Image (tube, rainbow, N blue to C red):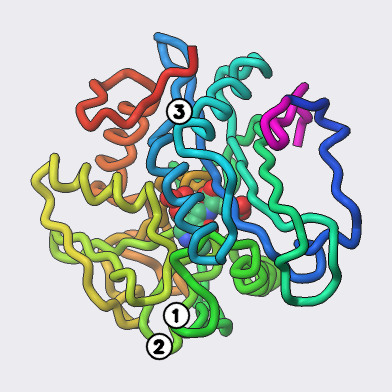
């Protein structure tokens, strides 16, 4: 990670190196934080943030689910994010707002710990490796499930959920895969450690519904809209594990991963074992819009300047 100049903290810009917290901050022991991941793209008319409003809304929704009162309005947070990108003179970057419980009392009960908001940005290239977008990645089905309902809130992008993601990812990587795909607690396909999942079979696209313990991904939603634009049938449907082995195409979506094809699952080739035509079409639409070479018909871009 290459540092940028400034980080936004509770309404002011501070130098990157000063964005520190005490080791006994509540968040360190108890993972009491919610966060976002947002991309800003280089376009011919200057840097533009993808679906800023939706990301800010999800951040505040995550905070609400975790009973954290973030003391900023959506408009204030959106303005801070744009200003941060401007101040750091970034053309394209990844933006990470974090709402956390800080230093105060120790113990699970967090009401005497201040809520602090940070926003950082930096340059972040390919999430799943160079060449992943064109060549696809090798994935496995994880031995770790996504969280069961009534354990941790999957719809909240909460730091606590990411120990589950880390376990999925570390297991996958240590076994030689690029990524792990988790099943939900009933054994149905849920999502990747940091991405939503889609399968293509017989010209139809399927993706698991929110009831399968997944993050309501903003890229997922964009892909659903783009498939509709392209006239490709798409639906939310429960996906049994073995569907991954007989799918024509499988791909993952996320802010960091964008749209990444999966070329094998558990060493079983997916389709022809390379990026499929539906995935490629959706990638072209998506990248065309975010980089400004195709019209932003959905109003997904917010210019920074
Ligand atoms: N599921 C999970 C578990 C997840 O972490 C992400 C994003 C998604 C789905 C896709 O959501 P969206 O970005 O709104 O399309 N993962 C973020 C963080 C990854 C990380 O390693 O940090 C991301 O892509 O920014």
Regarding mark 1 in the picture, which secondary structure is present there? strand
Regarding mark 3 in the picture, which secondary structure is present there? strand
Give the position of the N terminus as an image quadrant.
top right
**Is the residue marked by circle 3 packed among few (<14), some (14-19), or many (20+) residues within 10 Å?**
many
Label 3 or label 2, whichever comes before in sequence order: 3
Q: Nearer the viewer, residue 18 or 117?
A: 117
Residue most toward the front? 112
The answer for how far apart the CA atoms under marks 3 and 2 are is 36 Å
User: Residues in magenta?
Assistant: 1-12
Q: How many marks?
A: 3
Task: Identify whether 245 is placed above or below 290.
Answer: below
Residue that carries the numbered disc 3 in the rendered image: 49
* Residue 153 relative to residue 80: left or right: left
The residue under the point 36% across, 31% down is 287
Regarding mark 2 in the picture, which secondary structure is present there? loop
The residue under the point 49% across, 51% down is 60
Residue that carries the numbered disc 1 in the rendered image: 183
Image coordinates for residue 267, horizontal then vertical, percent: 49, 73
Check residue 119 for magenta coloring: no
The answer for how far apart the CA atoms under marks 1 and 3 are is 32 Å
Image coordinates for residue 218, horizontal then vertical, percent: 38, 48
Ligand 1 closer than 8 Å to label 1 CB: no
Image coordinates for residue 120, horizontal then vertical, percent: 68, 35
Q: Are marks 2 and 1 in contact (CB under 8 Å)?
A: yes
State the mark number for residue 200. none
**Is the residue marked by circle 1 packed among few (<14), some (14-19), or many (20+) residues within 10 Å?**
many
Residue that carries the numbered disc 2 in the rendered image: 187
Q: Are marks 3 and 2 in contact (CB under 8 Å)?
A: no
Q: Nearer the viewer, mark 1 or mark 3?
A: 3
* Residue 51 relative to residue 161: left or right: left
**Is the residue marked by circle 2 packed among few (<14), some (14-19), or many (20+) residues within 10 Å?**
some
Check residue 5 for magenta coloring: yes
């Amino acid at each position: 990670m290459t540092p940028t100049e400034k980080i936004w903290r509770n309404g002011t810009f501070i130098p990157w190196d000063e964005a520190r917290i005490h080791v006994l901050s509540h968040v360190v022991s108890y993972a009491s934080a919610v966060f976002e991941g947002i991309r800003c793209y280089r376009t011919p008319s200057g840097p533009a943030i993808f679906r800023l409003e939706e990301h800010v809304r999800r951040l505040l929704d995550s905070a609400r689910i975790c009973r954290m009162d973030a003391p900023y309005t959506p408009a204030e947070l959106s303005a801070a994010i744009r200003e941060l990108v401007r101040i750091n003179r970034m053309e394209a970057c990844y933006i990470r707002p974090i709402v956390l419980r800080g230093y105060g009392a120790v113990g699970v009960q967090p009401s005497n710990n201040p809520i602090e908001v940070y926003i950082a940005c930096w340059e972040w290239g390919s999430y799943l490796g160079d060449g992943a977008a064109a060549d696809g990645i090798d994935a496995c089905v994880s031995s770790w499930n996504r969280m069961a309902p009534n354990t941790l809130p999957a719809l909240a992008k909460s730091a606590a959920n990411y120990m589950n993601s880390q376990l999925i990812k570390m297991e996958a990587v240590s076994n030689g895969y690029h990524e792990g795909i988790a099943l939900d607690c009933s054994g149905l396909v849920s999502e990747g450690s940091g991405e939503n999942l889609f399968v293509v079979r017989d010209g139809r696209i399927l993706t698991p519904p929110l009831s399968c313990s997944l993050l309501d991904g903003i890229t997922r939603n964009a892909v659903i809209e783009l498939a509709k634009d392209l006239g490709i049938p798409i639906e939310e449907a429960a996906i049994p594990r073995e569907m991954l082995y007989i799918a024509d195409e499988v791909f993952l979506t996320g802010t960091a991963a964008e749209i990444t094809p999966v070329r094998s699952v558990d060493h079983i080739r997916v389709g022809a074992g390379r990026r499929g035509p539906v995935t490629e079409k959706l990638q072209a639409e998506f990248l065309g819009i975010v980089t400004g070479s195709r019209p932003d018909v959905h109003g997904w871009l917010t210019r920074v300047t």
